[in-house]
Image (cartoon, grey):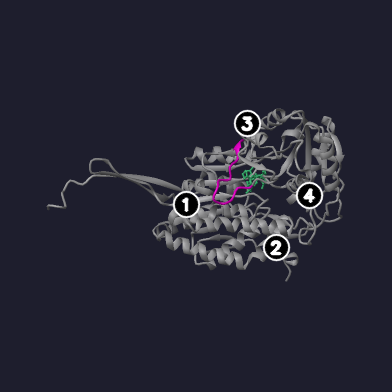
Amino acid sequence: MQTEDRTFDVRNLIGGEWVGGNGRETEPVYDPATGRVVAETPLSTREDLDAAVRKAEAAFPGWAATPVGERARVLFRFKMLLEENFEELRDLVTLENGKDKKDAGGEVRRGIEVVEFACGMPTLMMGESVRDVARGVDNVSYRYPLGVVAAITPFNFPCMVPLWTLPVAIAAGNTYILKPSERTPLSAIRLGELLSEAGLPEGVFSIVHGAHEAVNSILEHPGIKAVSFVGSKPVAEHVYRGGTATGKRVQALAGAKNSMVVMPDAVLEEAVPNIISSTYGNAGERCLAGSVLVAVGDVGDELVERVKEAASAMKVGPGSVEGNELTPVIRDSHREKVREYVGIGEGEGATLVLDGREPPLDEGFFMGPTILDNVTGEMRVGREEIFGPVLSVVRVKNLEEAVEFTNGSSFGNACSIFTENGAAVRYWRENVEAGMLGVNIGVAAPMAFFPFNGIKDSFFGDLHATGKDGVRFFTENKVEITRWYSNPATS
Ligand code: NAD
């Protein structure tokens, strides 16, 4: 059966068993390209979460005591299974999220790269040592897993975001509970099946589906040592405050409003396709989406003309059909919110250059590409995350003003600059307040061995996901200092 025609049974994974909804309330999962309900997500309760924690606690001592090389070997097998099932995973992402197959494949690939990174855990978990810190005294440190950890993930990367943390946490010896987005639970289920097939012991990886109650139960549960959250800013703040209040380690990756600064010397033939794909790829539902175009000096008119022309030429349609470029947003209610923002922008005095509010297709949750020009930092469309296919254009005199505009945002996830001028890049890099920077790159996504590095309101916590930060987040140190009294040479 084609992925597009299937319906799915969404169950929790607890102690290696796929457990049915037990009559819990459910939330429909839609195919955003058609509006068809493809599954129902059970909204798990405190009791369900507690059952998962108890199984994860029981599995922890055995998994933590499994040599790190053996744990890594499970991940090597998992990586092979992800490769073998690549197309199926890609199509599941397209089905439940709506993004096109190319983007969905990119997401699965980026997730696999974190698994590859985590396969190096024997090296990544190495401690440090200094011998002879005093006469006959050595100082060493060892890294240990934390225990039961949890991740709460968003709808926009249903395969990649869980894979940002689960391979690292598991390879480091933790047991891990995933609470996927209730709007996109399907990819997570497949990951769970493949982990079991790879030989992961029961209870090391669990899934508890649901929404608010499941999240709040995670924050309050004394058995959970650390929480990794990815999602919108208000919920990130809630999770950070709630989780740390109960003594947990929390990293909370939040929303964004990313500027793309275009200098007068930018190579527009190359910059414009980058801008289009950053703004409208995945229907603008990316935390790295360039949602504000900051036109510097006299580049504005030509730039807006070219972007408008390219945006208007985009093929709108289901992500499952090759060649479609603008895919649906996640829900009808979200489309309404995005459409409202366009009206708000007009009301605030922005110029509507391209209006995508009229649904271009009869079924599904599609919108056309939209451009608002002459936006300022005072306008809501200039500073709030819209998370849809809407580009706000801000015009500034010089680079100093471009940086000033960008830094006026409360968010600090990513920023891009388009220029051939190294001095401009240096000035921008040194002064701009954003944690992920792209030079002639519209989506500044770091590789798995670097941290996913939002700052300001785009991140709550200390240690980011992925890279060495990710390893530190999921481990703690013991530092040992040793002295021996007897003399083995003479005794
Ligand atoms: P969301 O905040 O609505 O949901 C994220 C998770 O929180 C989900 O699992 C959801 O069930 C849960 N949740 C939602 N509302 C809750 C509440 N009131 N109480 C408790 N739990 C709640 O985010 P989303 O709409 O799924 O995802 C889009 C957002 O995620 C955007 O803001 C985007 O920028 C952000 N995001 C950030 C990054 C990053 O790395 N910074 C990456 C991807 C997405």
- Provide the residue designation for mark 4: 332
- Mark 1: secondary structure: strand
- Mark 4: secondary structure: helix
Marks 2 and 4 sit apart, C-alpha to C-alpha, by 21 Å
Residue found 41% across the figure and 57% down from its top = 64
Q: Residues within 10 Å of mark 4 (few under 14, many from 20)?
A: some
Q: Amino acid at mark 1?
A: Val
- Provide the residue designation for mark 2: 91
- Mark 2: secondary structure: helix
- Provide the residue designation for mark 3: 431
Relative placement, left or right, of 108 versus 55 is right
28 w.r.t. 130: above or below: below
Marks 1 and 3 sit apart, C-alpha to C-alpha, by 40 Å
Labelled disc at residue 166: none
Q: Residues within 10 Å of mark 1 (few under 14, many from 20)?
A: many
Q: Which residues are magenta?
A: 445-456
Which label sits in the foreground, 3 or 2? 3
Estimate the x, y position of residue 446 in percent, counting from the top left: 60, 48
